[in-house]
Amino acid sequence: LINTCDRRNRSTIAPQALMMMNNNFVITQAKQFAARLRKEAGNDTAAQVDRAFLLALGRAPSAPEKSSSIEYVKGGPERLAEFCQAMFNLNEFVYRP
Amino acid sequence: MTNFYCSRRELLDRLGGGIGSVALLELMSRKGLLADTRAKNPLAPKPQMLPAKAKAVISIFCYGGVSQVDTFDPKPELLNRQGEKMTGVGNVVATMGTPGGLMPSPWSFKKYGQCGMEISELFPNVAQHADDLALIRSMNALSPAHGPALFQMNTGTILAGAPSVGSWVTYGLGTENENLPGYIVFTDNRGGPINGAPNWGNGYMPAAYQGTQFRSSGPPIVDLKPPANRTPEEQQAWLEFLNKLNEQHLERNPLDSELSARIYSYELAYKMQTYATEAIDIGKETAATRALYGIDDDLTGYFGRQALMARRLVERGVRFVQLYSGGGNFEPSWDAHWDLKGNHEQHCGETDKPIAGLIKDLKSRGLFDSTLIVWHSEFGRLPISERMDGRDHNAAGFSVWLAGGGVKGGTIVGATDHYGYRAVENPKTVYDLHATILRLMGLDFEKLTYRFNGRDMRLTDVHGHLIPEVLA
């Protein structure tokens, strides 16, 4: 059998996670994503969460995803941007649909 | 926490990590994620293949090419024939194309230790440990150009794209401290070596085995600190939220092990925020220790700090640490094409005391027998002059030494010809050195393989023989 197509290597390393957690560029992009959600979905948290899932993942959130997200976003004024940063960190966003 | 095995080291780490990390672990184990991600940790410790004392490697890479005839390979013949053409040694490769006459060393040599190893006055402190060194004077490499030679010394091949020695060692053995990377690299403060990160790259192996570059001032890793306005509690809540979503995704893709490996990487990243900073914080080291490494001296301060950090990392179970002395192509390095005297006085001066201090410190802490120190360059330098007072590259003969766990100290292996140009007696290749490093770490260089492109790859490819003389 002539087959030398190689498997993709893992790139799951801590410095990558650190970058996605702490890097200023990622945080700035998350804030801008949050601003876009406010603009496009208004101040309703449920609508913001729906819009975020559609823009980031191309789908609507499942019921448990939606309830966890709403609960998280309502935890404080900074939470919408932090929720957006979490979207960028999802395995589904970074790695595999 | 159920079904959770915890070693003494882990327990202490957990306690030191405080409520935050306990909470994250608790969260993950409650969700049944812990056993899964733990099994997926590609750096989990693995047993040695063969009995060996060394548990960690400290590679001291003198970038640019150390001159063997001025440091560890005395050649009085150069004085007798000063200025003469170097003949009778076969083809002489002068990389920069300006070969001069034979040039004696400006430094004198003395015998040190019980073994009577001759070492030049450039390394007066390292020389005090002559009986600990296994010196190989008959090394040769494939390329006299920095790039390919660096690749060969670091990865076994002169081409880019192969895993580095540190990758092979962490692939073979994992690492003891799961709160820190298993393979850490410090470059010179003036710049990094050419080829850049592929020098400590994972090549065709998973990225978990690549070297992580640490900085020796400020935060050790880029992006280590959370944003200023984010409290630990907030970060904790954020990670829990992220894990919750990732976990639902994992449930939809239960067969993809890489997803749980990626979730695991957040746990390590989170813990590294605390542990990496602590690991290289030399603030609590005693004045005596600082003095040992020459930390408060302008000349030795930078390399001394790195050498001390290397000890702290090895002490904490990091498997492989590489320290570079010498910056990039346009920064000061050992590449003494001109002013050999000034160049080697500076670089030996910067590293001699810290290296000797490291050996002494490891000994006093009982770590010397479990740590393998490898002192090397990518090649050596020619015994003839270049531009009157420099020396050109030389891959035909050069010196490296090993010390520490499993190494037979006070050993001299092989010899170069009477000029110090070519390794002629018992010549050793970089493959041989790599095979021996793996053996000293308890790894069999012929059995440690990684499947790639339909082939079981090895660090030494189809080459390499152990250097039995250096094994205790």
Image: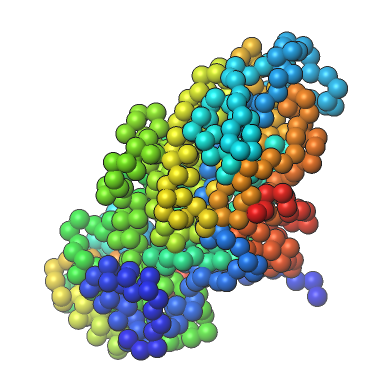
The image quadrant where one finds the N terminus of chain B is bottom left
Q: Relative to A81, is B246 on the left or the right?
A: right
Callout count: 0
The image quadrant where one finds the C terminus of chain B is bottom right
* Residue B435 seen anywhere in this rendered image of the structure: yes
Judge by depth and name the residue closer to the eye, A73 or B410: B410
Where B243 sits versus B201, above or below?
below
Residue drawn at point x = 29 percent, y = 61 percent: B274
Where B246 sits versus A14, above or below?
below
Judge by depth and name the residue closer to the eye, B207 or B345: B345
Indicate the position of residue A19 as horizontal and vertical percent values.
36, 58
Judge by depth and name the residue closer to the eye, B5 or B1: B5
Residue drawn at point x = 42 percent, y = 65 percent: B177
* Residue B384 seen anywhere in this rendered image of the structure: no
Indicate the position of residue B267 as horizontal and vertical percent values.
36, 70
Q: Residue furthest front?
A: B114
Residue drawn at point x = 44 percent, y = 86 percent: B252
Task: Locate residue B216: give its quadrant.
Answer: top left
Indicate the position of residue B235 as horizontal and vertical percent values.
24, 68
Indicate the position of residue B232 as horizontal and vertical percent values.
21, 66
Q: Relative to B367, is B91 on the left or the right?
A: right
Q: Relative to B170, is B251 on the left or the right?
A: left
Where B39 sits versus B425, above or below?
below
Judge by depth and name the residue closer to the eye, B244 or B133: B133
